[in-house]
Amino acid sequence: MSNVKKFVFVNRKAPYGTIYALEALEVVLITAAFDQDVSLVFMDDGVYQLKRGQQTQAIENKNFSPVYRALEGYDVEKLYVEREALAARALTEDDLLVPVTVLSSAELGALIDSQDVVLSF
Amino acid sequence: MSNVKKFVFVNRKAPYGTIYALEALEVVLITAAFDQDVSLVFMDDGVYQLKRGQQTQAIENKNFSPVYRALEGYDVEKLYVEREALAARALTEDDLLVPVTVLSSAELGALIDSQDVVLSF
Amino acid sequence: MLHIINKSPLERSALDSCLRTAGGGAILLIEDAVYAATRGHAAAARIEEALARFAVYALTPDLAARGVADRLIDGVTPVDYGGFVELVAEHPASHSWL
Amino acid sequence: MLHIINKSPLERSALDSCLRTAGGGAILLIEDAVYAATRGHAAAARIEEALARFAVYALTPDLAARGVADRLIDGVTPVDYGGFVELVAEHPASHSWL
Amino acid sequence: MKFGILVNEGPYQHQASDTAYQFCKAVLAKGWQVQRVFFYHDGVNNATKLTEPPQDDRNIVQRWSRLAEEHDIDLVVCVAAALRRGIREDNLAPGFRISGLGQLVESGIQADRLVVFGD
Amino acid sequence: MKFGILVNEGPYQHQASDTAYQFCKAVLAKGWQVQRVFFYHDGVNNATKLTEPPQDDRNIVQRWSRLAEEHDIDLVVCVAAALRRGIREDNLAPGFRISGLGQLVESGIQADRLVVFGD
């Protein structure tokens, strides 16, 4: 197990305005394939990545939000969402595509502190 | 004179962190060469473009701040700086490389409103 | 003047800079800026205040992509790309607050 | 944890997000973030408060490029690229707040 | 009515090029004219013919090329910005041409409206 | 001590690639090791051999190539991000190689520290 590290992916950007959310997911999947300990954090505008009901036909972009639902199949099950970020955007857990653990900003900070590798896009 | 339009360049970004300030200057020079009516607005972090004493050796980037001093030679003489932006950054006119007209946010807004073409980078 | 904002109001200062500077005209929210016009959002109050001075529009394709088309605050007019083009045509100039 | 911030505090939310979330450790200001640590800047008070919880550093080459090396607020330690590398080495992990 | 368009960011990384493209299509759908699309800053990266996006994603470069072909639209890449970023005649996609910043200023003068898309 | 580096933005538009380069030089100056530099997102644009910046400006791509040659540093460009943006073997500068995202994860596992540079 000496080759297992704790990777946390900190998602702070909205989807579609930039590609970071999509390309971050690609790294998450590969990291899981390497049997690493993977956590995802969604804070700031990153919580919008998990918003239900994304319909991208009119912007002619690919709707990649179903990939978050598929993460479980890759054993990526630790998804943490910032309570303050949801509140500032009038979102609740019911608005999200997938089950998540909601944490306070301070709890999220402590969680990130406990990781070996922090990737933020 | 029907081919003379009023172009305003709205500079809101700091130098060096991104290339926008430098490449905006290149457009300013060409627009002046086309004998258009050119104004430059510096607001938000854009006021830092005019800060005296930029020393770029250690980041190994080109110090392009002398170009602002050369603008007068291209008949680019209308430089407007936002008073509120200077204040928020503890800057005064003495900190700037070139003589400018300092305007309030509202005055700047009115000035931009009076232009034909607004280019913001 | 048509003010075009494409940045999230909680990530960047573009919307605030526009509201601080511009006296009036129209504001069109596109891309990540559309979140500003959603009910209950921390920036929604700024948009509601702005409605006194500006006509405010939001781009429907961007609202839909982000799953928030059903949350547009009252007073903000949804437009599609055709409406975007018309807004540009109706105003003598546009200012993209990048 | 070493928190690396590279965004202007008046343009982007990165510094505020870091300060809201992180309990302690070190903060290194680089690129456009160095303005936050200049005397009298609207964000300087936030940095001064942060000094109670964090060791705060600012990258000298970026301060010099921007002409503000002589304005660094008290309590913030200037470092060069070598110092940047040492900070990364001294902390078990780094978090770039992009 | 004639519209000039300025695109300041490359494909995929930011939505700017997508939005500019949809805007151009909507201009044409109204029977109006796209006088020119000028690519500046990283926007020049929209002009490389070497992109190969995943099958299930849009092909941004090809979309611009097709729009240019079908509607005879002038797609101009800034030479200085292009040299800095490795865009040359060799790797230029169909419908794009490389020229100077004067072409952008000309758009500002000749078009009825100039609209900027960027980050 | 071994450092892995991740670069998420292209040359010139953002300072990220410059800062990452200076960081690598400082690592080497201390006698430490740069285990790998991984280029992702628009960072892949650092790998094009076709850039030709103005004479009085730095040549970011060549600097990376030279660093790789002089210090035997592994410069890896993400294949998926590269295809999306038109970076291929044809236009790859010396010292760079194209490979998968697994190389980034490997950096995270094998390097003592992974440092991210972006926008």
Image (spheres, coloured by chain):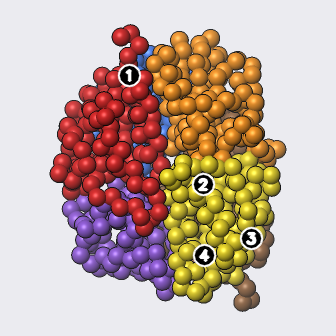
Chain colours: A red, B brown, C purple, D blue, E yellow, F orange
The label on residue E10 is 2
Query: In front here: A100 or F60?
Result: A100
What amino acid is labelled 2 in the image?
Gly
**Dot 1, how many residues are within 10 Å of its Cα: few (below 14), some (14-19), or many (20+)?**
some
- Can you tell which of label 3 and label 1 is closer to the viewer? 1
The label on residue E103 is 3
Which quadrant, please, contains the N terminus of chain D?
top left
What residue does disc 4 label? Answer: E114
Q: Chain of mark 3?
A: E
Which quadrant, please, contains the C terminus of chain D?
top left
Task: Report x, y in % for residue A95.
Answer: 21, 53
Q: CA distance from mark 1 to mark 2?
A: 34 Å
- Can you tell which of label 1 and label 2 is closer to the viewer? 1
Residue at 51% from the left image edge and 66% from the top image edge: E19
- The answer to whether marks 4 and 2 mark residues whose Cβ atoms lie closer than 8 Å is no
Q: Dot 4 lies on which element?
A: strand
What residue does disc 1 label? Answer: A35
Task: Report x, y in % for residue D21.
Answer: 28, 36
| Res E73 → quadrant | bottom right
Same-chain check, marks 4 and 3: yes
Task: Report x, y in % for residue A14.
Answer: 38, 51
User: From where the camera sits, is residue B23 visible?
Assistant: no
